[in-house]
Image (cartoon, rainbow, N blue to C red):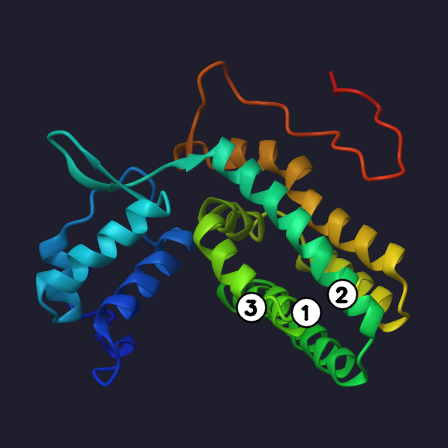
Amino acid sequence: MQPKEHIDVLDPALPITPQVTRHLRERIIRNDLKAGNRISETEIARAYEVSRQPVREAFIKLAEQGLLAVLPQRGTVVTRINWTDVLDARFLREAIEADFVTILAARSEPALIIDLREQIAAQRAVDPQDYQRFNALDETFHRTLAEAAGKAGAWRLLEGLKAQMDRVRFLALAQFPMNRLIDQHEAVVEGIAGGDHDTAVRAIRLHLREILSDLPAIQAANPDAFALPEGGIPDPLNVPLPGTPSEGPKT
């Protein structure tokens, strides 16, 4: 880490620990702090010009999210991406976000539709190489769905569970076109706008299942970022949507 590179992100008027936690989390998700690398409590404290106590507390929170680990004789390191955690987080997100859009399609509130369409326009305006900006807008889109459905608390719970999935999503931006994701967002919004529960739910399910087919290619392009599970890489594909027949596992 380059000393004092990130001091300006901290607001001294706000609690320090949550800020350090959030910023380190974002840097791990963006792969600025790379999987397998050691991370020093002392160096982080020096770089942010804070005491070691808030950094220690941030490390504990990030370890609880599976982003950091304490290893014998190595100290604290950035974890490699865990396949099981990614697949579990995706499963939970699909189940929960399908309920978000079910609620929203039943209401079809004009102000929300305007907001979501403006968000999509902002997504389309992002430079294709500006992964950080797009990732932030993507996060805002999904959080908006949760808050509009009156489920902000559920989203906060998801935030603590989806860290590994977020890392994969960021890596995916370098390999797959943003427009594909934006088109999927648009399909969700149009389903909500039309009060069409089935279309909205199917669209969000398809959107959150995209990662299943992308994951092997992302792992192949970033092998050092992933921890290979015992027994080899699982086959995450062919999870049928409700109402569609299963084709069985791919060979």
Check disc 1: other Cα within 10 Å, few if <14, some if 14-19, many if 20+: some
Per the rendering, the mark at residue 103 is 2
**Other-residue count near label 2 (Cα within 10 Å), few / some / many at <14 / 14–19 / ≥20:** some
Mark 2–mark 3 distance (CA, rounded to whole Å): 13 Å
Give me the residue at 86% from left, 64% from top.
191
Image mark for residue 209 = none
Image disc number at residue 152 = 3
Residue 94, position in %: x, y?
A: 67, 48
Q: Could you say which quadrant of the image residue 114 lies in?
A: bottom right
Give the residue at x 66% y 68%: 145
- Res 187 quadrant in image: bottom right
- Which residue lies under the disc numbered 1? 149
Would you say 152 lies left or right of 229 here? right
Quadrant assignment for the C terminus: top right
Which is nearer the N-term, disc 2 or disc 3? 2
Q: Are marks 1 and 2 in contact (CB under 8 Å)?
A: yes
Of 157 and 59, which appears nearest the observer? 157
Quarter of the image where the N terminus is located? bottom left
Name the residue type under label 1: Ala
Residue 119 position, x and y percent, is: 67, 76
- Is residue 217 rendered to the left or right of residue 45? right
Secondary structure of the residue carrying tag 2 is helix
What amino acid type should be assigned to the residue bearing mark 2?
A: Ile
Report x, y in % for residue 19: 29, 70
